[in-house]
Image (tube, grey):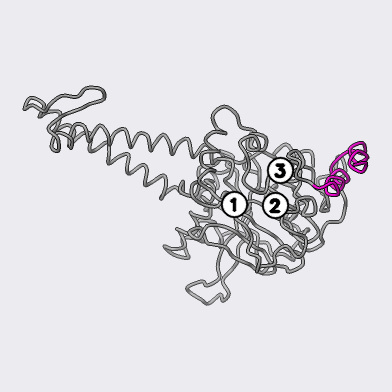
Amino acid sequence: MSRRAERISTRSCTPDEIMFGREYEYVRAKRRSVARSRELLNIDGQRRWRVEETGAAEGVFIPGRCIYAQNEAYLELANPGFGVQSLVTSWALLVLLGCLFTTWLWYGLALHPLLFGRVFFLSWNEPYESAMLTLVIGGWTVMLLFVAGFVFFVVMMFIGLGARTAFFSPLRGRVRFNRKTRQVYVLRPGYCGGDKVFAWDRLEAVLKPFPARMEPKVVRYEQAQPLVLYHPPFSADDTSAEGEDVIFIESATNTYFPEGVAGLWEYIRQYMEEGPSVDVIPPNAPASFKQVPRYLPPAYSTYCGMPSTAQCRLEMDVSFYLPLYMALAQSTCSWARFPKEWESDSGIGEPEERPVQAGAVMTAMVYRAEGKLANADEAEFMRRWGTAEGLDEAMAR
């Protein structure tokens, strides 16, 4: 387990992991053709592991900073991409500012003289004269080309590369594995597949979710990859592939680590099939350790809700200007909540409302720091994740 821990990172940072970038890319490929979407993840070119199969990994891999909650009823994980939102925001602002600046220059040199008879460039502003015709021509040619180029970059970044998923969308994806209902509940934007409920027994794990031709590049540059769960079509003979879909789950590794992806799948599989079987992970657990703990250490948990800038800095381990960009993007987002009619919590409660009971460790820590936990909840928090002294203090209140 300790060797695996060395591969845990706060977040992966690959170009296609932009919030819901993976989901967005898959849906766009599937709209073109089912064959293209399957080729994107090499669905037909590798073994897919079913829920009843063992052997995908030697032991379990508990991913850091991507578990919202875990309890006797459900395990909830995040989708990939959250850690690069601040980087995406900085690039998006740079491109947008460049687009606005060149548009303003084009307007001052090309359009303003025609409308108001004056030419301006930066701080220079003069009435239009025939000698300035060269500037006007340059505005309608050179500057217009720059404007078109920046507009193209904006469209490519937001539409082609999926940067739109970082703004005005759910803050993060949520994937909930329910042991009692044996269903998997997924929250994501409509243009990235929408909210769905999947039968656990029909899912298959894809451990190398990239085109086969890209494997040499992925291995060479150690590009981190998520875990993909494939839901096959309801009928193998259906050319429209009705029901076919995929779920992307954060692997929380910082390099290409297929053993970790396989171990993450084994962790999920063990949870759904066997459930938690030990209270905590024993120290120096062997690589073949395959039990699921009831109480996860805080290092494996992530905050469930709209985090503050300080919370982002704590979890994402970012500094300098990146938290500001993260906060800017988050101000346009909302937090996705599970519909009540799904009954996806099986009586335990939601992590945002009952973090201690739901096993949402990071959320419970934040609530405790903010004084939001009831005395009974704080005592239970200290019993699960605190110290004996802290428990005595909580019990005395």
Residue under the image location 55 percent in, 52 percent down:
170
User: Residue 121: horizontal and vertical position, in percent?
Assistant: 22, 26
Q: Is residue 63 left or right of residue 283?
A: left
Tell me, yes or no, whether the two marked residues, 2 and 3, touch with CB atoms within 8 Å. Answer: no
Question: Which quadrant of the figure contains the N terminus?
Answer: top right
Marks 1 & 3, CB-CB < 8 Å contact: no
The kind of secondary structure element at disc 2 is loop
Which residue corresponds to mark 3?
A: 64
Residue for point 86% across, 40% down: 386
- Residue highlighted by disc 2: 352
The magenta segment = 374-397
Amino acid carrying mark 1 in the image: Trp
Residue type (three-letter) at the residue carrying disc 2: Glu
How far apart are labels 1 and 3 at the CA level?
21 Å
The magenta stretch spans residue 377: yes
List the residue tagged with mark 1. Answer: 335
Say which of 184 and 305 sits in front.
305
